[in-house]
Amino acid sequence: MIQEKLTDFILKAIRNNWKIKALADYKGKSFTYGDVAGYMVHLHTRFEAYGIKPGDKIALLGKNSANWGITYLAVITYGATVVPILPDFKSNDVHHIVNHSGAKLLLAADHLFDNLDPEKMGELLGVVSLTDWSVLYDGKSIPISRMAEKIENLHQKKYPYGVQSDSLLLPLLPNDKLAVISYTSGTTGFTKGVMLPHNSLAANIVYANNNMPLSPGDAIVSFLPLAHAYGCAFEFLWPFTLGCQITFLTKTPSPQIILEAFSKIKPRLVLSVPLIIEKIYKKQVMPALQRPPMKVLLKTPGLNKIIHKKVRQKLVDVFGGNFHEVVIGGAPLNKEVEEFLNKIGFPFSIGYGMTECGPLISYANWDKTRIGSAGKVVDSLEIKIDSPEPGKIAGEILVRGENVMAGYYKNKEATSKALDKDGWLHTGDLGLLDKDGFVFIKGRSKTMILGPSGQNIYPEEIEAMLNNKPFIQEALVIEKNNRLEALVYPDYEATDKMNIKEQQLTDLLMKYKAELNKSLPSFMNLAAIKIVPEEFEKTPKKSIKRFLYTMTN
């Protein structure tokens, strides 16, 4: 068990940075650490007035915002369990998660609550607005909308002179207490509720403090979904405990909005998913490098280094020009993009994790990592590869230690499949481990396709090659009738710009298929490439929901 208490990290951060800006909405309101404390205490008083006890579940539904962050902190420091719900979930999924978790209270963004039917969440005491803390709905048992006087009296009794740095008290909750039930969608089926104790979150914070480049007062931009473990841990919770200034992008973060925010806020650490990096590479870097004069210059010794230096500086400026490194996680990074970024000396690192570890499993600083790897296992975990030759033959990645979840909520069967009797978490990911301890991810065991003669085919490898081709936005490789097929969603913006007609695009895809099949082993050859008319449905980590397409094809 980690010695440092999660609530102690939060309390010290607030007391040490009372008058410093803590949380802000991009182009909106901001809060000091003292302000955050005041709202947290107000919510604590509300919870008590409503009869919510430590250990009860409180659901949280909304896009990234300062109020979302304040609510999250209030719930876990009260001793309740927060149930963060992704704002992309359909109303039926929200109803199911609230009911399955047994949440007593729901705090929701007004526009998201409008899509819900509270009658289908019958156990709720009520629903509170994330916008202004007003009561949106009274449950059947007690009218929480009529408790304003009771709340005021409780607050006055606890803090007669107001909330001050030296009077703020938070319970030092034990790290074995349940902090979060995280219902995250995945690429292989419907979500399960991952139970993360305080210990898992504290272990991630301790590792980040000792190994990641961030200091008190640094600026952070939060655009990854806070209801997902990756964004919550490293764009919000850990930076908050350090005393950083966190700005939330409150709208759906398009690459344009993200880059605009980076240029204004100039964050000291950038977290990203591969999709953002790959789009920048494909839209801003590749077109310039593919011009005939540039191709000649890149082949000229001396000049190529100058060009690479200029490209590197342009990319650094794109991300605000003030960061230590860009940490990429959530999905595999395209191999060509990774190799190019490495060639120009761009400061990036690829981490590996999963919600079940809250989330971090492996990482290494950009100047210490190894190309193609996801770093080394974190200090608080053990790792092993379920393979006769872990350095040569890919096997399932198993981890054990402080970060690991307590199990899946109300799902003993799924828990027993994921956690064996010796405490090893079976990640479902395939990988290799080199002699120096670097982790190399090969793919998902559930997405691996068995070739005609027993060969292991990782569809991600073929997809990466297709995704680098002009006029392809994204690709998905599936197995159909014992043959490999690629489903392709075209880059319609590019085809329109170049006036590419439908038949021309079809001919181009046939050409790509021939080129790929010539370069790939025969057992990995594509039998067909088919165009899909709409963008693939994705998880919040921007991974394609494979199960939707393998089931229907």
Image (tube, rainbow, N blue to C red):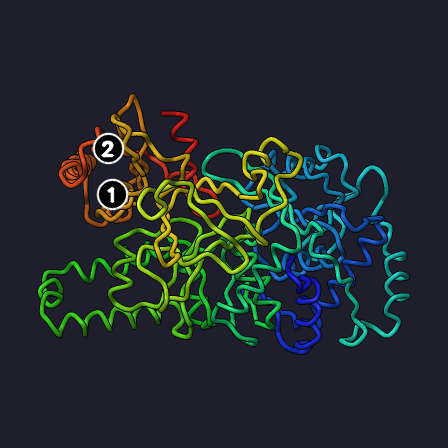
Circle 2/circle 1 CB separation < 8 Å: yes
Front-most of 286 and 76? 76
Q: Is residue 399 left or right of residue 320?
A: right
Could you tell me residue 294's position as x and y percent? Answer: 13, 65
Crowd band around label 2 with a 10 angstrom C-alpha radius: few (<14), some (14–19), many (20+): some
**Residue under the image location 90 percent in, 61 percent down:** 153
Question: Badge 2 is on which residue?
Answer: 529
Q: Earlier in the sequence, mark 2 or mark 1?
A: 1
Q: Nearer the viewer, residue 507 or 462?
A: 462
| Percent x, y of residue 120 | 70, 32
- Callout 1 environment at 10 Å: few (<14), some (14 to 19), or many (20+)? many
> Can residue 491 be seen at all in this image of the molecule?
no
Q: Tell me where residue 243 sits by quadrant.
A: bottom right
Q: Helix, strand or loop at disc 1?
A: helix
The C terminus lies in which quarter of the figure? Answer: top left
Disc assigned to residue 466: 1
Q: Nearer the viewer, residue 103 or 91?
A: 103
> In the rendered view, would you say 528 is above or below 537?
above
> Is 16 situated above or below 272?
below
Work out how far the residue at label 2 is from the one at label 1, CA to CA, in angstroms. Answer: 10 Å
Residue at 42 percent across and 72 percent down: it is 323
At which x and y percent is residue 216?
A: 57, 75
Measuring from the top left, give residue 552's x and y in whole percent.
39, 25
Decide if residue 92 is on the left or right side of residue 144. left
Q: Amino acid at mark 2?
A: Ile
Name of the residue lying farthest toward the top: 481
Q: In terms of depth relative to the viewer, which is nearer, 200 or 535? A: 200
Left or right: 478, with 219 as reference point: left
